[in-house]
Amino acid sequence: MKEAKEMEIIQIEVEDDGRIPNHWKLPLLIYREALDSRDDAVKILHENGWSGEWLGSVHPFHHYHSNTHEVLVVDAGTATLQLGGELGEKVDVSAGDVIILPAGYGHKMIESSDDYQNYGAYPGGVEFDVNYGESDERPEVLDNIKKVPMPEADPVFGEDGPLFNYWND
């Protein structure tokens, strides 16, 4: 695992487009090459209180979670993701990258290498909902997003991790 100060951190902020709410306050973060193949991503996530993990890929359609934040740890391969809904940014990610999505932040797989896979996990192992940006989801999801508490720890770097330099009450 890299030291937090040695790592490139990308901050993305996309406004609510009427379908995908994103987050009114917290930015999406990407830690570039935060982990390497020798690191045990699941162990690191668990140590920092992020669990409920799964190994797979990002759905090929815009979606978001209104009841929890999410971390995606790219385990293998490369991909282009669209982050933040139709108005969001297309971002290339590769093994070792960590994407931290605040509640409400849209994400979609655009394309990936055949070997692409990522872990997903949630603070406290919360069982996540899946929303698609349909009009009947509002205003309930907007209320849900506002109620999601701050995580107790950065998913990779723990209680003093760089997440809290970008996310604060």
Image (tube, grey):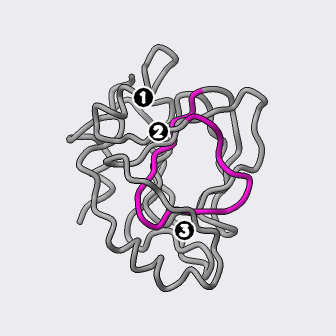
Q: How crowded is mark 1: few (under 14 residues within 10 Å), some or many (20 or more)?
A: many
Magenta residues, start to end = 55-75
Residue 30, percent across and down? Answer: 49, 45
Is label 2 in a helix, a strand or a loop? Answer: strand
Which of the pair 32/72 is nearer the observer? Answer: 72
Side (left or right) of 55 relative to 82: left
Q: Circles 1 and 3: CB distance less than 8 Å?
A: no
Q: Quadrant of residue 132?
A: bottom right
Amino acid under disc 1: Val
Which of the pair 103/168 is nearer the observer? Answer: 103
Residue 122, percent across and down? Answer: 40, 48
Quarter containing the C terminus: bottom left
Separation of marks 2 and 3 at Cα, in angstroms: 26 Å
Q: Residues within 10 Å of mark 2 (few under 14, many from 20)?
A: some
Q: Residue at x 63, y 74 (%)?
A: 133
Quarter containing the N terminus: top left
Amino acid under disc 2: Glu
Q: Name the residue under label 3.
A: 14
Q: Name the residue under label 2.
A: 53
Is label 1 in a helix, a strand or a loop? Answer: helix
Residue 46, percent across and down? Answer: 33, 33
Q: Mark 1 points at which residue?
A: 42
Q: Is residue 51 highlighted in magenta?
A: no
- Give the mark nearer the N terminus: 1 vs 3: 3
Is label 3 in a helix, a strand or a loop? Answer: loop
Amino acid under disc 3: Val
Q: Which residue is drawn at 53% across and 74% down?
A: 21
Q: Circles 2 and 1: CB distance less than 8 Å?
A: yes
